[in-house]
Every structure is written in C-alpha cells, then in structure tokens.
C-alpha cells in the first residue's frame, strides 16, 4: 500500500499580523485537522481517500519570506524508489523530484496548482507505477479558514479561503467605536460595576421593520422548508427568495430562528439565522445573508463545511462567557460580540457584510474585591469548609495577592514556587501535590492557586471561574476548591467567596476577533 506524507511549505507570504496571541490551537473537521503552535506557525493535515494510510501536511509560516516549497515524504522505503507523479484535475502536473534527504520537492508552479485544486474541490492525485491515491477535500475549507482566522489573515491577499484584494481597505468604524467608548466611560461614572448588558440594551437596534420567526424543518430527513409562510409580516417576495436560498441549518433540534431586517441600509431586508448546534460546547451559531435580486446570499466565500450559511459568530455556553448584541452606532447596525474572561470584557464591533480581519475592539478591565463569606445554607450538596474569622481574613489576603500577581486580565497566575511548603524527603511525585491545584475542565477558567491555612496545616486552594460571569447581585462567578497535598491532592472541600467588581481601565484598539471557538 502506498504510504505517503505530503508536506506543503508555504513561505511566500510577507504579511502584517493582526493576531499576536502566542497560544496554540487545535481543530478538526472531517478528513482534515489543524495544529497551530502559535500565530506564526500552523500545520494542516489531510488524509487520502479510500482508507489509504497516506496523509498530507500543509505548513504555513507567516513570518517567512521567499518562494514556497513543497515536499513529499514516503514512509514506505520500497515505494520511495520511484518519483511520484502529481495529477491535478485529471491533468499530469509533472514529476516530484527526489532530494537528498528523501523528500520529493514540488516546483513553484506545482505548489500554486495544488493549492488551486485543493481550494476549488478538484482532484489531487499522487500516482505510483502500481497505484494512485487521491487526497480528500472533506473538511479542508473549514480547516484553512480556521488557519486564516487564527493567523490574522482573513481578508488579506495571503488568506487561503476568505481572501481580499491587495488594494482593499478595512471599513472605517472609528466613529462607532468612539461612540461606544464614550458611552462606556459615562456608564463607568454612573455604575462602576459596568453592567454591559444594560448598556447594550440602550443601543439596541430599533425594532421597526423587523420580523422574527422560527422554522421546524420538515421531510423525512428534517431538511425541508414549509410551504406556508410562518408570519404574515413576511412579504410574498421575501418568502419566495427565502425558499430559493440556502437557509437550512442542521441543528440539534431541527429548528432554527430567522430575523428579517435591513442590516446595511440599502432599503432591503436581509436575513439573520440563529441556530442551536449543541455539541459539548452547547454552541449557538449566527449567520447573515444579504438580500439579492431573487435570493438571500452569503457574502462569505462559500464553505461547504460551515455550520451555518453566512457565518458571523458563535456563542459557547459551556466553556466560555460570550454574547452578541445587535446595536446601532453612528447610524449603522453592528453586532457587538462580547468575549469575556475573569477580569476582562472584550467587545468586538462586527459590521454586517464587511469581512475585515481587523475590527474595532474595546476592552474593559476589572478588579474584584474578593472576600470569604458564609455559604448558602440551602446548598446541601457542596462540602463547605467552616472557617474562623481569622482564617477568612487570611484567605482574603491571599485572594488579593493572587489578583495582584496576575500578568494580565483574563490570564491565570501560576506560582513560581510551590503553594505550600514541601516537607523534606518527599518524592518528586508526592511533592507535586504541594505545587498547584489540578487542572480544571474546559468549562471553567483557572485563575490561580493560593495557600489556605487551616489548623496550622497548609492546603492548596484552586481558584476558578466560569470565565468571569457576573451580576451586580450575585457578584463574580468564582469558586475556591481546597485540596489536601498530604492526601495526594484529594478535595477537602469548598470555600464560599463573593466578589464585586469595579472598572479599572477602558481601552480602544483594532485587532482580530479572539475567542470565537465555534469557527
């Protein structure tokens, strides 16, 4: 059997990065998967069809320059004696030349041809004298779009999928950004806890000429639209366009919500699609379609793997703290996309049908006054620890010190040394339980670790939050779990913590949307 691995090195692009996050990314869709070490280095892996064990590795370095090069590596030494032939769309595209290191090099024209075939769903075949293998395209668009997004290349000439002309300019949203910034500053002076939802409701897009309706799909496979209009407020012309358009979403409950509203001020009502996709993240996806002559159409480059037509953003109800608000600023409708963490709200202004990699962004940073409180007596399921007043004060000081040592809002503070003193003569494994609390699941954010002293015994206190979820009445969502290092990190109990927040900074910037993990 042919056993190959095709490595595509793309170093021809010299670009200005919008995303500077050094954290990695993993993403999989059908036969393709993505691993990004950081924003400058990403690898996409695709499988061959028919159960063939061969795979293709496409690597892009955004800080490299020069011509692109492609290599084909055989893991089967018997098969690597002959140079494989590249066939694109049924047409021979030349022989791959073997190099001294055992790789088979692509020419610059072969690189260009292979990428064009890959992105336009044309056959890519690697042929040997005894057999040929086809590269699968299932999932490639979603993976490469994710790579473009993570590396800050959306709507740039260097993008794989959603590419912009080299002369295109980002939409000027500075006036809208200034208006929202001033409103946030004013709200800060009125209420320093900053209830963002309340402020957004004041700027909500007017409800005039807006029609909302839900559709439960019909047919044996639950993918058919009903013939009858679900609302009398939908014009016959709009309903005909709706029936002709790609508006069906494969949701968990076979139902989607739709809104007809003029999003760009051209006098024609466009379409918003909200779909509960579910999954482990309990995702809801939102897409927007522009009204054309006889249909609603997506202005995003076609992606057969997209979960919703005209993808705009998603919210993750388990594993994130996110929300979207349709608001009007500077006489223009925007989607204000809030992505929050403990200590920070990031608000991105997404203009409908304007696909810029760099968008207007406002960051609100908070500080919390954390204190140990008495637990709710109605909660009989949690193993609450009872602390003396002196112990509560001690824990409160540790919580304050934890915030002071956070490198930046939204991050975690990891101690440089063990949280609790490590007794001598312990093994490395045993000493590890004194160092830090267990890593949490994806549904919570780790804030950091503190020492908790009870009866002259040090315990490791792990501080977690549901990504800074907040209400003025309940305070910040925060948990303090106490682990016993003497008992191999066994959970000893919980400590009830309450915290009110206050705004410490409001900043303006432009940048790529970070945190939309539904893409």
Image: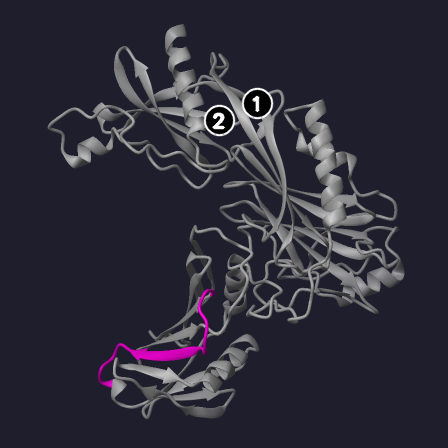
Instruction: Answer whether residue 77 is magenta in the image.
Output: yes
Q: Nearer the viewer, residue 274 or 482?
A: 482
Where does label 1 land, which residue?
Answer: 475
Q: Residue at x 38, y 14 (%)?
A: 394
Q: Residue at x 24, y 26 (%)?
A: 485
The location of residue 143, given as percent across then percent down, is: 50, 64
The location of residue 256, given as percent across then percent down, is: 68, 51
What are the residue bounds of the magenta stretch?
Answer: 62-78
- Tell me, for residue 478, which label it has, or none: 2
Q: Residue at x 79, y 54 (%)?
A: 263
Dot 1: within a 10 Å radius of its alpha carbon, few (fewer than 14), some, or many (20 or more) residues? some
SS state under label 1: strand
Q: Where is 377 relative to 240, above or below?
A: above
The location of residue 73, given as percent across then percent down, is: 31, 78
Q: How many marks?
A: 2
Dot 2: within a 10 Å radius of its alpha carbon, few (fewer than 14), some, or many (20 or more) residues? many
Q: Quadrant of residue 159?
A: bottom right
The location of residue 238, given as percent across then percent down, is: 84, 60
User: In the displayed image of the protein, which residue is found farthest to the left?
Assistant: 425
The C terminus appears in which quarter of the rendering?
A: bottom right
Q: Nearer the viewer, residue 512 or 386?
A: 512
User: Do the CB atoms of the residues marked 1 and 2 lie less than 8 Å apart?
Assistant: yes
**Residue 379 seen in this snapshot:** yes
SS state under label 2: loop
C-alpha span from label 1 to label 2: 9 Å
Q: Where is 225 relative to 69, above or below?
A: above
């Amino acid at each position: 059997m042919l056993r190959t691995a095709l490595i595509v090195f793309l170093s021809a692009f010299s670009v200005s990065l919008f995303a500077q996050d050094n954290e990695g990314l993993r993403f999989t869709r059908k036969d393709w998967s993505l691993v990004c070490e950081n924003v400058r280095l990403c690898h996409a892996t695709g499988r061959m069809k028919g159960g063939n064990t061969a795979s293709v590795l496409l690597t892009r370095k955004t800080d490299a320059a020069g011509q692109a090069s492609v290599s084909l590596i055989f893991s089967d030494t018997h098969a690597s004696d002959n140079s494989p032939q590249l066939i694109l769309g049924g047409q021979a595209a030349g022989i791959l030349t073997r190099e001294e290191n055992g790789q088979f090099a692509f020419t610059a024209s072969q690189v260009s041809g292979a990428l064009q075939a890959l992105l336009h769903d044309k056959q890519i075949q690697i042929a040997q004298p005894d057999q040929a293998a086809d590269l699968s395209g299932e999932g490639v668009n979603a993976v490469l779009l994710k790579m473009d997004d993570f590396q800050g290349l959306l709507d740039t000439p260097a993008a794989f999928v959603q590419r912009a002309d080299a002369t295109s300019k980002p939409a000027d949203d500075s006036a809208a950004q200034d208006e929202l910034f001033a409103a946030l500053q004013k709200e800060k002076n009125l209420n320093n806890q900053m209830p963002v939802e309340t402020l957004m409701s004041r700027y909500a897009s007017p409800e005039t000429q807006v029609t909302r309706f839900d559709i439960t799909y019909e047919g044996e496979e639950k993918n058919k639209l009903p013939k009858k209009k679900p609302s009398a407020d939908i014009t016959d012309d709009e309903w005909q366009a709706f029936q002709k358009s790609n508006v069906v979403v494969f949701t968990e409950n076979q139902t989607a919500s739709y809104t007809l509203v003029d999003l760009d001020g051209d006098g024609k009502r466009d379409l918003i699609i909200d779909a509960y996709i579910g999954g482990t993240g309990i995702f809801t996806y939102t897409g927007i379609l522009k009204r054309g002559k006889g249909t609603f159409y997506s202005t995003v480059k076609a992606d057969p793997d997209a979960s919703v037509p005209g993808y705009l953003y998603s919210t993750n109800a388990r594993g994130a703290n996110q929300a979207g608000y349709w608001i009007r600023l500077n006489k223009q409708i925007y989607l204000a996309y809030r992505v929050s963490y403990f200590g920070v709200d990031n608000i991105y202004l997404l203009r409908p049908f304007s696909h810029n990699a760099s968008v207007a962004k406002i960051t609100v940073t908070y500080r919390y006054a954390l204190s140990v409180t008495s637990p709710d007596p109605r909660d009989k399921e949690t193993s609450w620890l009872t602390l003396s007043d002196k112990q509560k004060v001690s824990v409160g000081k540790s919580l304050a010190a934890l915030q002071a040592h956070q490198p930046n809002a939204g991050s975690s503070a990891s101690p440089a040394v063990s949280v609790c003193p490590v007794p001598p003569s312990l093994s490395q494994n045993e000493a590890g339980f004194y160092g830090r609390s267990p890593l949490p699941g994806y549904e919570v954010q780790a804030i950091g670790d503190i020492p908790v002293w009870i009866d002259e015994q040090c315990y490791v206190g792990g501080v977690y939050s549901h990504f800074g979820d907040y209400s003025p009445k309940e305070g910040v969502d925060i948990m303090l779990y106490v682990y016993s290092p003497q008992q191999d990190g066994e959970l000893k109990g919980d400590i009830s913590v309450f915290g009110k927040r206050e705004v410490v900074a409001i900043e303006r910037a432009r940048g790529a949307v970070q945190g939309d993990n539904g893409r």
